Amino acid sequence: MIPARRRGYGAGMAQEESTSTVLVAGGANLLIAMAKLAAGLASGSSAMLSEAAHSFGDTMNQVFLMAALRKSRKPADPQHPFGYGMERYFWSLLAAVAIFVLGAGFSAYQGVEALVSASGSEGSPTWSFVVLGVSFLFEGTSFVKGLVQLHGNAATAGTRPLRFLRGEADPALRAVIWEDGAALIGLVLAAGGLGLDVVMGGRTFDGVASLAIAVLLVGVAYGLGRQNQQYLIGKAASPQLQADIAALIGEAEGVDSVMELMTMRLSPEEVLVAARVDLADHLTPEQIERAADEIDDLIKQRFPEVRHLFLDPTPDRDEDDAAEVPG
């Protein structure tokens, strides 16, 4: 195995944009959570209290995401030779767990409590509607900022935004978009439940809205958790990136073929590549080493996200076996 030369790297523009996006989302969620809590206590609305728990949970998630962005910047060391990029997936997984436990759990409790209670709301829902409207404005602003970053990052990666979000997007950006999107839907559900109860009386629709918010948050938590789990257990780079890298190595001087290519994404900006290649038979050990360095330079110039490249020069056994057969 011939290790390619390693190069230093910085946090990257995408990570700085993610930090800004998380800060905007965290500040908006904290203000919204306090307003929702006050309106929920004043009106006795289960949906408003569920939305308050949702926003407080989102605020805690922003703390997790900031920790992820900060810890992932630590340079590589002997105990972690490939760096700390996967910290972002770990802390984003914790954020998904927080959404499930805090948001979905409390919303489900409030929904059940509202459905089994025979009494109506304790106060006027007027302020609840005002808070929901203002919250929609703030959440929408944060959501739009996330979408702008998503479109910019996807354009830089040369792919479509939805595919980029599902695949190689920064986990902090992915969490903000999922959370803000869910928050906007939750606000609509809460407003719908409150409005129907104002028209019909009772707390039935308020409770149904709380349960619907709980189901929504369970879906968001599962989606985020599943995506981060895939990267924590060693998800490969995109098929297109793998194909491009294999093609470039195969075209390099002295390489007869690429027999096997394995990749692992260490962070949104970092990819590890290990390739088993069949080199030309006439190459000397010095020429093999020189060819490995040239391939390393070529790959890292073309694909800056490839931080670590390992080449294993292995002869093609099928060709060797065929050469040994008489005739």
Image (cartoon, grey):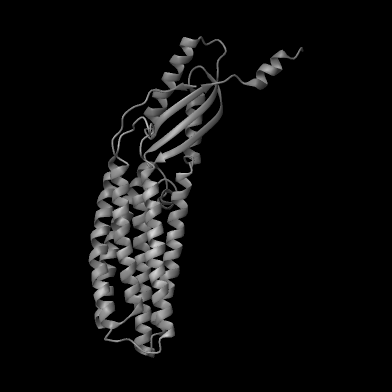
Which of 96/193 is in front? Answer: 96
Image quadrant assignment for residue 189: bottom left
Give the answer, above or below, for where 232 lies relative to 57: above
Work out which quarter of the rendered image holds the C terminus and state it. top right
* Residue shown at 40% from the left, 63% from the top: 101
What percent of the width, then of the height, locates residue 135?
A: 27, 69
What percent of the width, then of the height, locates residue 284?
A: 51, 9
Give the answer, above or below, for where 302 lies relative to 202: above
Give the answer, above or below, for where 17 lies relative to 100: above
What percent of the width, then of the height, locates residue 306?
A: 40, 32
- Point out the residue furthest to the front here: 79
Res 26 seen here: yes
Which of 288/144 is in front? Answer: 288
Whether residue 148 sits left or right of residue 279 in the image: it is left
Res 129 seen here: no
* Residue shown at 51% from the left, 28% from the top: 275
Give the answer, above or below, for where 235 lies relative to 258: below
What percent of the width, then of the height, locates residue 51?
A: 33, 71
Whether residue 56 sits left or right of residue 306 in the image: it is left
Number of callouts in the render?
0
Which of 148/230 is in front? Answer: 230
- Point out the residue furthest to the right here: 327
